[in-house]
Image: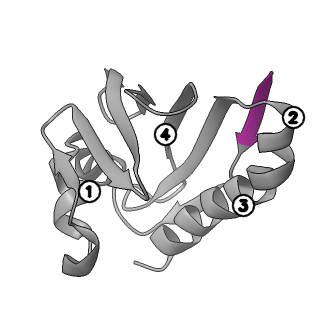
Amino acid sequence: MSAQYSSKHGIVSRPQAELYMAFTDMRNFLAMMPEDKKQGVTADYDTISATVQGFTIGVKVTRREPYNYIELQDDGAPFKFMVSLHFDPADDPLKCDFHIDLLADLNLMMKMMIGNRIQEGLDKIVDGLTKI
């Protein structure tokens, strides 16, 4: 059963190209993580994976549309998912309109257990970026 989630839109105080470049290399995610969270996490340009409580969750970039769009898919996760990162122009060329779409293959139980957390997590990512 597919579940679709969309974050809110947020205006990030970074030019579209700069924000896109920060997300295009998965090693940047590893570099931004606190030291105490890096154990069990590996990354290269196209992939990142982490082992958490015995579960390995991997993500790989499947499509890049320079400065506009990045598509990520599961790579060894317990369920199938696809994440779309959107970097849209804002009225101010020094800012970017950012939002995230997620499509996940969740059964009814998983959807009920973590659906709200997924939505909250997506919105929290956008909120965090709008504060930089």
- Which amino acid type corresponds to the residue marked 1 in the rendered image? Phe
> Rounded to the nearest whole Å, what is the CA distance between mark 2 and mark 1?
30 Å
Which residue does the numbered mark 1 point to in the structure image? Answer: 29
Which mark's residue is nearer the viewer, 3 or 4?
Answer: 3
> Rounded to the nearest whole Å, what is the CA distance between mark 2 and mark 3?
15 Å
Q: Residues within 10 Å of mark 4 (few under 14, many from 20)?
A: some
> Rounded to the nearest whole Å, what is the CA distance between mark 1 and mark 4?
14 Å
Q: Which disc is residue 85 wearing?
A: 4
Which of the two labelled residues, at mark 2 and mark 1, occupies the earlier sequence position? 1
Which residue does the numbered mark 2 point to in the structure image? Answer: 108
Residue 107 picture location, percent across and down = 79, 30
Q: Residues within 10 Å of mark 1 (few under 14, many from 20)?
A: some
From where the camera sits, is residue 8 visible?
no
Residue 78 higher or lower than 7, as above or below = above
Q: Are marks 2 and 1 in contact (CB under 8 Å)?
A: no
Which of the two labelled residues, at mark 1 and mark 4, occupies the earlier sequence position? 1
